[in-house]
Amino acid sequence: MGSLQDRQIAIIGGGVAGLTAALALSRRGARVTLHERAPAITEVGAGLQLSPNAMRVLDALGLGPELARISLRSHAVELRNMQGARVLRLDMLAHRPNAEFRLIHRARLIDCLAGAVQAAGVTLRLGSDIQTPPEADLTIGADGLRSRMRQILNGREAPFFTHQTAWRTVIPDRDATPCAQVFMGPGRHLVSYPLAGGLRNIVAVMERNAWQEEGWSHQDDPANLRAAFADFRGPVPHWLDAVEQVHIWGLFRHEVARNWQNGHLVLIGDAAHPTLPFMAQGAVMAIEDAWHLAACLDAIPDQPQALSRFEASRRDRTTRIVAAANANARNYHLTGLRRLIGHSALRLADRLAPKLALSRFDWLYDHDPTSEEP
């Protein structure tokens, strides 16, 4: 144990960021209280992709065997056109055989983290609607997109509507082909991958001017999703025919927070750096944050200095990831001549240099938070 021994820490938010931080901090000797305003730690039905940079943290926290049981290992990402024809295959298993990409239901990840947090002795305060930082040596704002803790540090901010809306659904499907597939069409795309237990996650994004609120809780008629992607082929029509319930939300672009901490309050996860869902790194960045924050606080006795070190170590990387997600939002939706040229270039890379195409993301997936010195 280091500088965190018996330090009293309050965490606001019981999602992936807050739970991972609670586990990482308690394992280093901190006395953690986690405040969640909902009456129970639960999650709606949705899938997550956990890339190796997150899995290294979760393994180090002792969750690897349980995650292997409740998730699927993904072998590849396939980019396809709207007719279902292959454009590019990124074979992650061949490129990095020892690196784990996992596909998991978000609710199962939350359950896994919550169980580990309770076993570690973290105090849970459910139904705890925190308006201002509570009494503690340190407060961690892990309270997501509408973070009150971020507003304390940065004031009111207005996100930018991207003129894109997204549908999210989970369907029964016994096809567990271990890869994520992205079907790209003019002004829209659809991502799908299998989940453990005979399920399939679907996220479909379409450009349009109609405004939808942020958040996943807005239900929509499945017929609207089917109509938006009626001209997509391959397995997409079969998948969409199976949709019985779907949620829709607007995609907003938020800036990375100007201020992450003030010596007594610090932001992690979506509260610090919300991202569009086009790199599958939202939850992953939160998991990385949790480990880095615990490591900095444990290694550096002076708390303001430790928080400054944490912010400095995370700002450039998270900003780069957010920018990469913004770029994918454009690249997936190409139209006309740009689409023809772009897809032709990807097909050429698929034939001649598939490993080179995947190595463009080595900076992202090869990162190992557990091996870095604070």
Image (tube, helix red, strand yellow):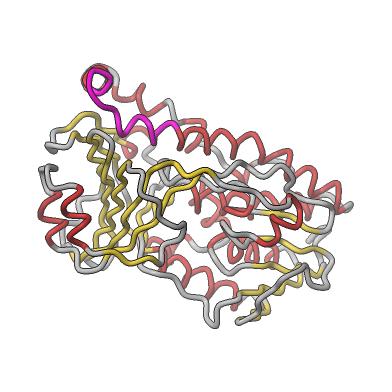
Residue closer to the observer: 119 or 171: 171
Q: Position of residue 204 (x, y in %)?
A: 28, 49
Residue closer to the observer: 136 or 145: 145
Q: Residue at x 17, y 37 (%)?
A: 82
Q: Magenta stretch mostly in which secondary structure?
A: helix
Q: Residue at x 12, y 60 (%)?
A: 241
Q: Is residue 307 magenta?
A: no
What range is drawn magenta here?
327-339
Q: Residue at x 28, y 61 (%)?
A: 169
Res 267 quadrant in image: bottom right
Res 314 quadrant in image: top right
| Picture layout, residue 326 above or below residue 143 | above
Q: Position of residue 347 (x, y in %)?
A: 22, 22
Residue closer to the observer: 253 or 277: 253
Q: Position of residue 234 (x, y in %)?
A: 10, 44
Instruction: In the displayed orientation, state which residue is furthest to the right.
Output: 302
Which image quarter is the N terminus in? Answer: bottom right
Q: How many marks?
A: 0
Q: Position of residue 190 (x, y in %)?
A: 26, 45
Give left or right: position of 12 versus 193. right
Give left or right: position of 177 versus 71. left
| Picture layout, residue 133 above or below residue 81 | below
